[in-house]
Image (cartoon, rainbow, N blue to C red):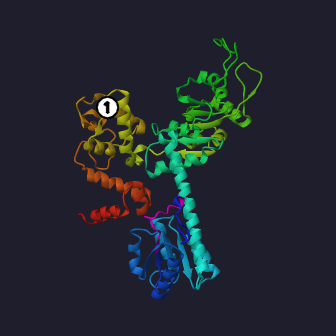
Amino acid sequence: MHRPVSDPMPDPAAGITPEAVPRILIVEDEPDVARMLARMIDDLGDYRIETCLDAAAFPGFLSDPPDLVLTDLMMPGLDGFEVIERVKRVDPDLPVVVISAYATLENAVLAMRAGAFDFLAKPFRPESLELMLTKVQRDHGLRARAAAAASRAAVLDPHLNALRGTSPAMRSLREWILKVRDTRASVLIEGESGTGKELVASALHAGRGPFVAINLAAMPPDLAEAELFGYRKGAFTGATRDYPGLVMEATGGVLFLDEVNATPPHLQAKLLRCLQNRTVRALGDSREQTVDFRLLCASNQPLEQAVREHGFRQDLYYRLNVLHVTLPPLRDRVEDIPELAESFVRHYARLHGCPARRLAPDVLVALMGYSWPGNVRELENSIEQAVILCPRDAVALPLEVFPALLGGRGATGTGHDPGGGTTLAEVERRYIETVLADCGNNKAQAARTLGIDYKTLLRKLRAWEESP
């Protein structure tokens, strides 16, 4: 944030531009001290400085959060610890520096534990203040670079882009994938059918080496062992040639076992041995061969429950569940439905040679009011069907081409009638309230998630509070 006067140009990586002068809020009950501090900061660089002398006025300054807060520790009506708490509620990353004449080690430790970025003792020299501002600038620059790098990675990565949605749950999922992608640890992906477990596995694989996917529920139990581990010619009737097996084919890449909860008991023991020893023995072979792959598994049922019910080996469960993620159902991230639906409309219009169309407002209302028991897969299938059935001369997809929505099957039970009666304003309100709840009522974070201005969000919330 801090830019010394001698610097001819701002540092773009630190987020400083001539149009965006850093704003510093001084919270201090003594006017003379506040003015002196403001003069010292002004001498050190190009800043916009605001001063809060009254505890009652402090919440108003957070309606448009500054870039840095400097606060006294002991003030009537509002102490520095409460300032830190209120700031962190608005924006956990906003730095707060405590300046106090009560510079005991205990106070400094308590302030840092509460979330303060730094602690300065009064009286302090300009050099101390400049050093603190430089530390804030460096931290801000590192955060900006890390955020920019993560953003670039997400934008350029087709595997991450396949996981559409801007909800907090989807953003957290993409961040988690970037953290664990380069490890070799086994991953257990759980979630309802249709939530995109194979897409997550593909994003973890990221196109590096072979990707061998097997649906164990679709594989006949008596053939599963031969398919997975291979066989030698003559090992059984019909084995007319050597077959290496899918595990061997995954060497150097990823083996993805979908619906691993359906693994037959006899196969669980052999899979466990394979994971423990990193070797595999084909049917009819006396030799073991070394294999090297990363194991990703998916289950549409909680695997821990299957262990408790003695349907799945506990020792194998621990081998599979080194890293774990549970995918949210679509009904828990309704804010992602418009983006998903529009992307499916574009995709299937191109695929089937249909005219480009948009979603009618009442369709969008209905899509967001339906519970989607089949999750994203059901939404995708419904959109494809609607694109095909839509009259050629229609500008927008009408509600009539969505049989599930017209029938009300899978309604959310929230009082919403997918066929009518709910306005777009009501859908918007429900959407914003959902995002706010996901953000722990942090309005600044919710505004960023929603892609709207912070003041716009506050204006909407005030209007809803005042309405009957």
Q: Residue at x 72, y 18 (%)?
A: 284
Q: Nearer the viewer, residue 319 or 376?
A: 376
Q: Is residue 320 left or right of residue 336?
A: right
Q: Is residue 366 above or below residue 135?
A: above
Q: Nearer the viewer, residue 132 or 403?
A: 132
Residue 332 visible (yes or no): yes
In which image quadrant can residue 465 be found? Answer: bottom left
Where does the C terminus fall, quadrant-wise?
bottom left
Percent position of residue 2, x then y: 54, 69
Element under disc 1: helix
Percent position of residue 313, x then y: 64, 38
Percent position of residue 435, x then y: 40, 55
Q: Residue at x 62, y 43 (%)?
A: 321
Secondary structure, magenta segment, majority class:
loop
Give the residues in magenta: 13-24
| Residue 384: in magenta span | no
In which image quadrant can residue 127 be found? Answer: bottom right
Residue 441 visible (yes or no): no
For label 1, the residue is 387
Q: Is residue 67 left or right of residue 264?
A: left
Q: Nearer the viewer, residue 419 or 388?
A: 388
